[in-house]
Image: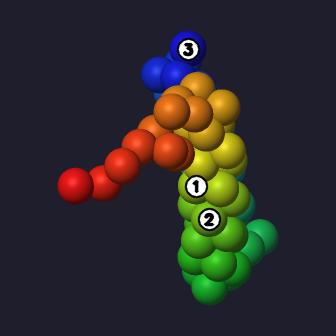
């Protein structure tokens, strides 16, 4: 289940980046805006993955580090 979530998030990121690049090629978005959107997307997906990770692997949160 966790792996499916990771794959789904990767697919979302891939599709969103493709859409941004297409708009950049069509001169509807500037290179700077695409770069900013890419960074924001990565940060959002990282946050979502951290939430999912806690849901799928709650025991790791309390694991003792040696």
Q: Give the image location of residue 59, x and y in percent.
A: 51, 33
Outermost residue to the bottom: 32
Q: Is residue 47 visible?
A: yes
Outermost residue to the right: 28
First of labels 3, 1 by sequence position: 3
Marks 1 and 2 sit apart, C-alpha to C-alpha, by: 5 Å
Q: 20 above or below 1?
A: below
Q: In which quarter of the image is the C terminus?
A: bottom left
Mark 2: secondary structure: helix
Question: Residue under circle 1?
Answer: 46
Q: 34 above or below 2?
A: below
Q: Picture quarter containing residue 27?
A: bottom right
Marks 2 and 3 sit apart, C-alpha to C-alpha, by: 22 Å
Number of other residues with Cα within 10 Å of mark 1, as a class: few under 14, some 14 to 19, many 20 or more: few
Mark 1: secondary structure: helix
Mark 3: secondary structure: loop
Query: Which residue lies at the image location 67% right of the left edge and 69% below the top edge?
Result: 40
First of labels 2, 3 by sequence position: 3
Mark nearest the camera among 2 and 3 is 3
Marks 3 and 1 sit apart, C-alpha to C-alpha, by: 17 Å
Contact check, label 1 and label 2, Cβ < 8 Å:
yes
Query: Which residue lies at the image location 61% right of the left edge and 39% below the top edge?
Result: 54
Question: Residue under circle 3?
Answer: 1
Query: Which residue lies at the image location 55% right of the left edge and 14% below the top edge?
Result: 1
Q: Which mark is residue 43?
A: 2
């Amino acid at each position: 289940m966790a792996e499916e979530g990771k794959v789904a998030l990767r697919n979302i990121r891939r599709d969103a980046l493709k859409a941004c690049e297409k708009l950049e090629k069509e001169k509807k978005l500037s290179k700077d805006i695409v770069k900013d959107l890419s960074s924001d997307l990565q940060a959002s997906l990282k946050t979502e993955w951290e939430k999912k990770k806690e849901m799928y692997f709650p025991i790791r949160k309390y694991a003792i580090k040696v």
